[in-house]
Image (spheres, rainbow, N blue to C red):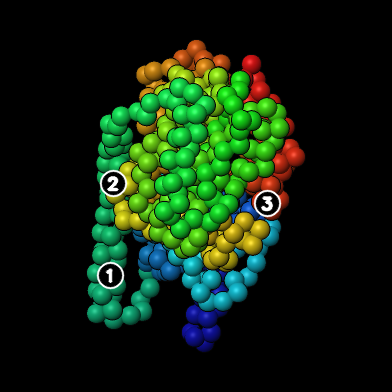
Amino acid sequence: MSTSVEKNSARPLAAQRWLWSLLAGLAFAVTALLASASAQLRINPAALGNSGEITVANILLGVFLCGSLVWWLLVIRPGQVSLVRGAVAGVLVACFSYPAVLLLAEFLHSDARVAADLASLLRQLGYVLVQSALGLVTTGFASTIALALTGMLIAFLQRRSAVYLAPSTRGTKREVGLLRRMFRGLVFCAAFAVVTLVAVFVGLTVLPTPQLAASTPPRPAESYAQALAGFAVIQAQEATLPLRPECRSQLQTHGDKVAGVVIYFHGLTSCPAQGDELASRLFGLGYNVLVPRLPGHGEADPLTLALASVTAEDFVDTAEFAIALAQGLGDEVIITGLSAGGTITTFETQNDSTLAGAISVAPFLGPAFLPPWATQAATNLLLLLPNMMLWWNPETPYSSPRMPYVYPRFATRAVAELMRLGRITAAQAAWEAPAAQGIGVLLNEADHSVNNALAQQLVAQWREDGRTVDLRFLPQADGLPHDVIDPREPHGGVSIVYPILLDMIAVDSK
């Protein structure tokens, strides 16, 4: 009879534990969503986004699953409901939620594909773990504190409820003592994790960004002949490198110096072939056009490690040599660039007074998955860490047949150097007005690779300095990819983008 009574009483208790676990998971999920929104993290409100894009559904589902499981394992058992356990559970949920949410972002999207083999799956997992570590180190302190407080609140409410779970009488004293020691160790680890994350974030944030090394600027070309001689130097240097033919620097001229010359800087892991169609359009409008190859790009081996050693100084030296050369190609020099090329363009916008115009297209000043206030910490962290080569798309670790010149993976050190250049530009803008005569910025609202908020902050600073900035947007509804310049890009929209960009260039050349 007593056994039957125990079984009958155990059933409602089990149901109550499941209910509290689910409620805890829901509370953690809502807290994480609110924390992400308040941290200015870019979140797509759609149920399913693109691969790697954080959505509301990703956050709610990922944190809910982690929260429910951790609460069931750590807190819900008889005698385990306490404020300390609730706080520890919140810290664990914060740590495990980063990879959980990012895994959902990789696999639960509108054009999801199942990994073809174990190697593809491992590559995707590796990318998610690296991204999770970066997010946890730079923004994790805020989420761990928020979820720890939420865990304490849930534990308090559960203890005060009418269904308080009494301590269990099962287990030997030895088992109870071992579990207590294990939990004390877990408490120490959770506290240590929170303190460490706070200390690391503060340290990385206050650490100043390394400034550019001093260099002697190149002499501007005084004539068309000198400009051609300068381009011949570029050609001679590139002839010694194992480059793809379409990735060599390009120059289209009308045979003499003209009114305007446009320089296009391509994006990270691409090459001058990205801008060949744009260059032809500009040439047809009467401009001389220069498309320089950025250092480390365009090599025939798509798995090259050349990008691992490229620095911000290398990017700036290439840009300044191209601008000096262009002085002999046109009366007015206008520069534009996409992504990494956009980063270079923003720096030259800030520093080069010889430019008649500068139009940055989707400049990479920081990754989209990090809020603007964490960019300084993320930049310094990537600069301190050893280089890692990560796949753009772990499911297809090879170059696209449509764009064979694009490297299938990128170097984290090159990303760090571009972010460093962006931080230097932002710091300069805070105390000095930009030098370029005309300024334009074109942002893609559907872009989930770059952080548009950082570009908008830079525009706002330039406007505070009294400068007029032609800021335009490619609407979210167009759903354009990050690369809006290369006509070979799948789902690209050059028919939409080129007229806008050409108009912005024309405005600056007037």
Q: For mark 2, give the secondary structure.
A: helix
Task: Residue 10 in the image: state x and y as whole percent.
Answer: 51, 75
Q: Is residue 402 left or right of residue 71?
A: right
Q: Quadrant of residue 285?
A: top right
Circle number at residue 182: 1
Task: Residue 501 in the image: state x and y as whole percent.
Answer: 66, 31
Sequence-first disc among 2 and 1: 1
User: Cα distance, mark 2 to mark 1?
Assistant: 26 Å
Sequence-first disc among 3 and 2: 2
Q: Which residue is mark 2?
A: 200
Q: Is residue 286 left or right of residue 323?
A: right
User: Which residue is at 36% across, 79% downward?
Assistant: 170
Sequence-first disc among 1 and 3: 1
State whether residue 375 appears in this view: no
Quadrant into which the C terminus falls:
top right
**Which residue is nearer to you in this view: 223 or 368?**
223
Q: Give, as a three-letter code, the residue at label 2.
A: Val
Count of numbered marks: 3
User: Which residue is at 37% across, 19% downward?
Assistant: 431
Q: Which residue is mark 3?
A: 488
Q: For mark 1, give the secondary structure.
A: helix
Q: Is residue 156 left or right of residue 60?
A: left
User: Cα distance, mark 3 to mark 2?
Assistant: 42 Å
Q: Give, as a three-letter code, the residue at label 1.
A: Met
